[in-house]
């Protein structure tokens, strides 16, 4: 009648550490000798993210145990998510405890809790070799949860919103984190010193804090000094610079205001929750974490084809969180196929393009859906954003070793709605066909990169997404969602210049391509050509002198800043300082073209600003 945990192993998110759980199952009825039992995991994301080192059971003979490092083929042969199967040689009396142990390694993502249950198989006749084996039956009430909780504090993040809000303050999240970026808590309160805009104040930190700092008079970065003597033996501030007896952590750049009275905003709109069959964590909790821990300005989800009650709940969570001038939400979902993936976004929750809605789209290949999208775009507004365009699925079909999906099929440009592309995500950088390692180009030479699309005539702005399936917007977690090519506490965001932090304004600014994408930095970027903002078009006569204006505030010295046109670097320079403002001659306009900016920080952060499209008459 129950499945309970008999001990408390204090499990936490980890790459390595093993924790042993002891369980007691109390059967709801008497089971005869020879009965088999199975212990199963309920959620796909937890099943594949937890690792299982050992199973032990004295009262049963274990016949099957799940591997600690299974292959894709193994997963496909275990669709019931069976962790172990055992035969009870002496049966199990009703309500008498049957004990067993599991030694596990939790995932690196907090909140990916593992919900277990007991299933029984009454093998009635061992002498009849051809007798059918009954299907397993779940014992009702036999569920328990293994929680994936944050580990000890090993980092301190400072996330300031990039410009002051309408109230004249800078909303700033100060978040102790474990080594994977999960919000954590100090064992004891830590008295820190916060410096901002020439002033200092004491700050007692236990867990995450939301501060409202005064508007800066010039470019500022919050600075917090953490006394090392206040940390326990298990705690660290690995992202701090040691000065004397303190670890110094410096936040992201904040400008006093934006150019042309625009507001800079950061957000993320490609992440999955438990509304996706391969995702986990509730959507409302995901939104709250994006707002309160990563201190984002806007979000939209990208679950796989949410329909019915899932869409109702999606809309409810987004509407509840939407707060004009404070935090913006809008609506979206992912349409996946074996020939590329793309997400749809809109501001109306009753839009015809909702999954299975009046537009008649619930899935399908992008090339086959183009006619429907073209027709819908004549009467309704929406955005289509392709992602991992230059990637091929890592998983392969058993029957013919073909990939589950192929690169994105770039077709004719569709300027009304195909105006943005996800240039970076957990599957790496999608900008070009070949990269050096520092640019994190996991997939190469698949002929569907962003540069390929630009060469075909697509006018695309750049956004950054994660495509994570752990319900943590912005978190580009490594391990099985990145194969270790990027740091374990990585963050990818989209920056946008918008008149107002409000749903329609943010959406319109995205559609105008006034965007930049950042990976492991919250760099602020203003890029323009002849006064025309990134993402826009400028028409000039042939022979016009072209000048780029760049204002960039990064989080570290700049290894390289580059302007790219038609796949070629037309300007490049390194900077020892993180703040740059410079005019750059681009020569004369001889043919229609585009210019975009990319930059690499010394600490590995990556920056892309959307192109300016030059039309020569």
Image: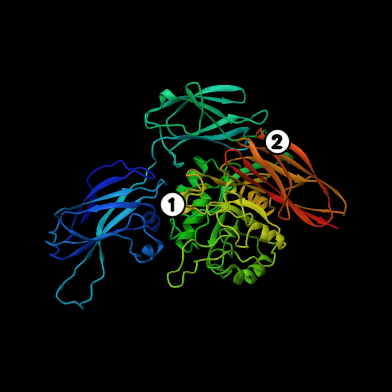
Residue 126 quadrant: bottom left
In three-dimensional space, the C-alpha distance between marks 1 and 2, rounded to whole angstroms, equals 41 Å
Mark 1, Cα crowd under 10 Å, few <14 / some 14-19 / many 20+, is: some
x and y percent of residue 8 in the render? 26, 42
> Disc 1 or disc 2, which is closer to the eye?
2
At x 65%, y 34%, the residue is 578
Q: Residue 331 versus residue 294: which sits nearer the camera?
A: 294
Q: Position of residue 261 (x, y in %)?
A: 72, 40
Q: Residue at x 36, y 44 (%)?
A: 16
The extreme bottom residue here reads: 130
Q: Position of residue 29 (x, y in %)?
A: 16, 61
State the quadrant of the N terminus. Answer: bottom left
**Label 2: few (<14), some (14–19) or many (≥20) C-alpha neighbours in 10 Å:** some
What element does badge 1 sit on?
A: loop
Left or right, residue 483 beside residue 380:
left
- Could you tell me which residue is drawn at 60 percent across and 72 percent down? 368
Badge 1 or badge 2: first in the primary sequence: 1
Label 2: which secondary element = strand
The residue most toward the front is 436
> Does 78 sit left or right of 290 as displayed?
left
Image quadrant occupied by the C terminus: bottom right
**Mark 2 — residue?**
580
Please tell me the numbered disc located at residue 282. Answer: 1
The answer to whether residue 328 shows anywhere in this view is no
In this rendered view, identify the residue nearer to me: 210 or 8: 8
Residue 564 coordinates in the image, percent (x, y): 72, 50
Residue 455 seen in the figure? yes
């Amino acid at each position: 009648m129950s499945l309970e945990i008999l001990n408390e192993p204090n499990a936490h998110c980890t790459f390595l550490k093993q924790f042993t759980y002891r369980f007691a199952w109390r059967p709801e009825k008497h089971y005869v000798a020879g009965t088999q039992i199975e212990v199963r995991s309920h959620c796909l994301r937890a099943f594949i993210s937890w690792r299982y080192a050992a199973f032990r059971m004295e009262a049963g003979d274990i016949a099957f145990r799940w591997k600690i490092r299974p292959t894709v083929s193994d997963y496909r042969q275990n669709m019931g998510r069976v962790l172990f199967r055992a035969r009870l040689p002496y049966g199990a009396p009703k309500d008498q405890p049957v004990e067993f142990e599991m030694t596990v390694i939790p995932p690196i993502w907090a909140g990916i809790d593992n919900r277990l249950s007991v299933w029984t198989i009454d093998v009635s006749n061992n002498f009849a070799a051809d007798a059918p084996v009954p299907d397993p039956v779940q014992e009702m009430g036999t569920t328990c949860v293994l929680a994936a909780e944050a580990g000890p504090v090993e980092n301190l993040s400072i996330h300031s919103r990039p410009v002051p809000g309408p109230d004249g303050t800078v909303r700033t999240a100060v978040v102790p984190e474990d080594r994977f970026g999960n919000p954590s808590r100090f064992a004891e309160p830590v008295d820190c010193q916060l410096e901002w805009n020439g002033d200092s104040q004491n700050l007692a930190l236990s867990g995450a804090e939301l501060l409202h700092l005064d508007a800066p008079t010039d470019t500022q970065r919050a600075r917090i000094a953490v006394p090392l003597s206040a940390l326990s033996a298990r705690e660290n501030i690995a992202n701090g610079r040691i000065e004397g007896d303190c670890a110094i952590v410096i936040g992201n750049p904040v400008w006093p205001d934006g150019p042309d009275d625009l507001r800079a905003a950061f957000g993320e709109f490609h992440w999955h929750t438990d509304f996706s069959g391969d995702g986990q964590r509730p959507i409302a909790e995901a939104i709250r974490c994006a707002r309160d821990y990563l201190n984002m300005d806007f979000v939209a989800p990208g679950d796989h084809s949410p329909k019915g009650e899932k869409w109702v709940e999606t809309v409810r969570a987004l509407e509840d969180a939407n707060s004009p001038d404070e935090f913006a939400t809008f609506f979206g979902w992912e349409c996946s196929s074996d020939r590329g993936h793309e997400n749809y976004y809109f501001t109306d929750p009753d839009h015809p393009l909702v999954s299975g809605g009046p537009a008649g789209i619930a899935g399908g290949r992008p090339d086959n859906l183009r006619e429907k999208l073209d027709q819908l775009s004549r009467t309704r507004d929406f955005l289509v954003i392709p992602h991992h365009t230059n990637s091929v699925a890592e998983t392969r079909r058993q029957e013919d070793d073909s990939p589950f999906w192929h690169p994105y099929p770039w077709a004719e440009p569709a300027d009304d709605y195909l105006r943005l592309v996800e240039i970076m995500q957990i599957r790496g950088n999608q900008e070009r066909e070949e990269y050096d390692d520092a640019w994190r180009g996991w997939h190469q030479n698949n002929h569907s990169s962003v540069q390929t699309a630009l060469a075909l005539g697509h006018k695309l702005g750049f956004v950054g997404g994660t495509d994570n399936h752990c319900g943590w917007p912005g978190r580009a977690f490594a391990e099985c969602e990145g194969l270790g090519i990027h740091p374990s506490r990585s963050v990818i965001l989209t920056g946008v210049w918008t008149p107002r932090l409000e749903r329609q304004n943010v959406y319109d600014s995205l559609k105008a391509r006034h965007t930049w994408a950042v990976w492991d930095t919250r760099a602020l970027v203003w890029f323009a050509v002849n006064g025309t903002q990134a993402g826009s078009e400028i028409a000039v006569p042939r022979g016009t002198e072209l000048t780029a204006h760049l204002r960039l505030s990064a989080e570290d010295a700049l290894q390289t800043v580059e302007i790219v046109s038609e796949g070629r670097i037309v300007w490049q320079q390194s900077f020892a300082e993180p703040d740059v403002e410079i005019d750059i001659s681009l020569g004369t306009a001889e043919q229609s073209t585009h210019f975009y900016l990319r930059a690499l920080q010394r600490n590995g952060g990556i920056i892309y600003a959307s192109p300016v499209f030059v039309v020569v008459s």
